[in-house]
Amino acid sequence: MKKLHWTWYMAMVALVFYLMYPLFYFYTRKPQRYPVVGFLRGVWVDISFWISGIFYRVDYEQPLDSKTTYIYCSNHSSYLDTPFMCAIAKGNFHFMGKKELLKNPVLKLFFQTIDIPVDRESKIGSFRALKKAEENRASGRSLILFPEGTMSLNPPELGEFKNGAFKLAVDKQVAIVPVTFMNNYKIMRNTGKKHGSRPGVMRAYVHAPIETRGMGEQDIDGLRDKVFELINQKVHEYAD
């Protein structure tokens, strides 16, 4: 049944995307239209979740300002993390993800336009991705990324956090918003191809933004470790 549910969910994601494709295509053609893309992605994932029996609950430590630019960082153990983030992020936002997503028949539209593909094996590629992220931040777009760089193979254990997001936050004095996904992996582990998926209620906790004003290069590791500990503690509280 889990494999059947996974097949149904993925089919619904594709179906709703292609029904909305004319809108996605139009609003990804020009950067000045990008603010609408976040809203449309939220509608897309909500419909896909609902018709698949997947619901969610989000608790915010404090309200987020839709007009403020943030860098969102979360743990990553499920294919559901990315669409769920579309329901959490506020305002104008975009993702940074692995370059292989350019080959995804659904996501490639976004990674060819609003989102940022990154070659994790190339230092030059990573530098260019961070440079592009800074340009987007300057234009008012929040950034969403998963500092582990890939999905955890042993959830709820977290992988090591990489420094990129925290360096960018400190260099540009942008607040970090840690997000804890507490049970997504129980509904769909990793991509779902092996374990399948099931209906259920996903839970997320959005921590208060961590301001980086006044921080310097010497604070990057400490910021990374603080975000790691916040997420790690919360996910294990739920798991226990």
Image (spheres, helix red, strand yellow):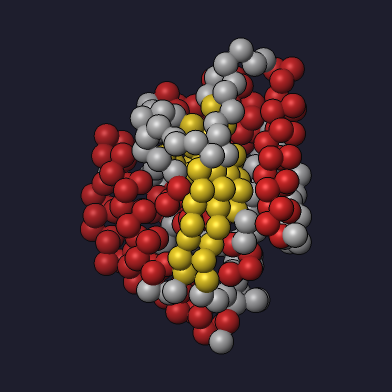
Q: As displayed, is residue 134 above or below residue 197?
A: above
Image location of residue 40, percent across then percent down: 31, 52
Left/right of residue 4 with respect to residue 113 in the rendered view: right
Viewer-nearest residue: 26 or 192: 192
Residue farthest to the bottom, as pictured: 1
Image location of residue 122, percent across then percent down: 66, 40
Q: Quadrant of residue 178?
A: top right
Viewer-nearest residue: 173 or 203: 203
Q: As displayed, is residue 228 above or below residue 26?
A: above
Figure quadrant of the N terminus: bottom right
Q: Residue at x 49, y 52 (%)?
A: 58
Q: Quadrant of residue 223?
A: top right
Image location of residue 180, percent across then percent down: 61, 48
Q: Residue at x 74, y 17 (%)?
A: 218
Left/right of residue 10 with respect to residue 217 in the rendered view: left
Image location of residue 28, percent across then percent down: 30, 46
Q: Residue at x 51, y 80 (%)?
A: 5
Figure quadrant of the C terminus: bottom right
Left/right of residue 229 with respect to residue 111 in the rendered view: right
Left/right of residue 9 with respect to residue 179 in the rendered view: left
Q: Residue at x 39, y 60 (%)?
A: 45
Is residue 121 in sight in this rendering? no
